Image (spheres, helix red, strand yellow):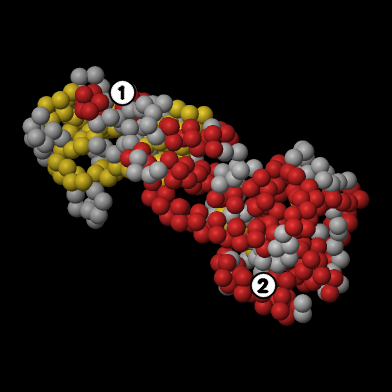
Amino acid sequence: MPEHELHERVRNYVTAKVPSLHDRPRAVIAVSGGADSIATAALLIESGVLVPEQPLIAHFDHRLRGDRAAARDRAAVDELCRRYAIECVVGAWDAPVAGEAAARDARYRFLAEAAHAFDARVIVTGHHAGDQAETVLMHAMRGAGLHGLSGMSSDAPLPLPHGDPPLRVARPMLSIARAELRAYADVLALPYVDDETNADTRFTRNRVRHDLLPAFERDAPDIRSSLLAIAEHARIAAAALDAIAAPVIASTGDPNIICVSRAALRTLTPEVAEHAYRLALVRLLGDARDFDRRHYATLVRASGARTGATFELPRGVLATVDAQEVIMSRGRIVVPAIDAELEQALPFAGVLGGWRISVTPCGEVDGADEQIVQLPADAVMRRRRPGDRITLANGQHKKLQDDFVDRKIPARLRDLTPVIAHGRDVLWTPYVVAVAGADSRRYAIEAKPVVSVPS
């Protein structure tokens, strides 16, 4: 195929499928030294998707193939950078271990660091149509659901926690065949290295590439195109499920905690509820690796478990059942306790227990999100105490403990909940405004949970 036709295909694919590469952003291009990544970088520049001043070439040495192989890889990368006058950053794996997943995670961590240092928001990889077909077939062999059959996304969040600002992974070559990339590198006389480990059929992907797919092609010559079509249809279906599941999930402002509404889950079928939990895990962790149907079934059961129940999941995720939500967190939620002796005069602004509180005299706020409450001059903010009582708007007098129980506030959260009190009379909690006695001033109160607590 003439080069200009390949350039046009790449430009059209980026326009349609890779929004993070629009407008020629600063980007980090991952280049190993192999034909796929070398050709990817050249294609993006020759086609005009990126200009040489904007990308950074990032080369990562996994230190798994020896010094001689590493030197050949680096020489190919250096030649590419000289050809296009592109800056290059090189990293190496400090503690290499066996395993494709560990190598991938180490590489992505390096790429994320390079992107942040370069002030880039996009990481570009050279994954192509052949990689996509292999990925879909491998996932099908494992019994994957819709997301597995979707294969790799052309534009997706970086698949591991990486801080702020958020990073994207762009795969602009998913419509280009492996042979086309190699031929393009040959036409431009760009040197590249053939990694001998790519022929090692001890690895699952290599067996799929060299043995299984060719065997299928003898009876189904269009198997690769069919796998790409499956990926596209699965991606459309998964996006539709995402739209249904997304309202069930709420962020907390804490990147280590995400909440799933129990009431909303009850409106979903078990299959869609599993999808909602998967979406929550992706938001929490960056991807849902290591989670399978057993774990999703456990989470669906958690939706109906008793308040306070906890479920331990892979990668340190803990699911904690609250009255209204299942809280999914990286490790146990640790909230600083409110000092039992604390009596904070008003006004007040800050964090107490599980809440961020602002209590401001009226006239000093805009009134957009605040409650307006009348309070005695010597009212204080503190945590609950034995004997506290509350008078509700209907005139009912209750012990504060009974009110918390009736509102299904989990026991673990009760001493983490600030109250405003006058003596033993509680006048305000994040859940209710009580009937106050003699008042001297009107306050605007805004309360937001730092971690999930039932509202």
Q: Residue furthest front?
A: 219
State which quarter of the image contains the N terminus: bottom right
Q: The residue tagged with tag 1: helix, strand or loop?
A: loop
- 356 left or right of 318 in image: left
Residue at 61% across, 62% down = 229
- 400 left or right of 166 in image: left
Res 366 → quadrant: bottom left
Q: Position of residue 119 (x, y in %)?
A: 61, 60
Q: Which residue is mark 1?
A: 341
- Amino acid, disc 2: Val
Q: Residue furthest right?
A: 68
Instruction: Mark 1 vs mark 2: give the one in front.
Output: 2
- Amino acid, disc 1: Glu
Residue at 78% across, 47% down = 207
How dense is the environment of label 1, judged by Cα within 10 Å: few (below 14), some, or many (20 and up)?
Answer: few
Answer above or below: position of 87 versus 159: below
Res 303 → quadrant: top left
Pick whichever, 164 or 50, lies toward us.
50
Pick whichever, 27 or 361, lies toward us.
27
Pick whichever, 62 or 152, lies toward us.
152
- 48 left or right of 321 in image: right
Q: Which residue is mark 2?
A: 10
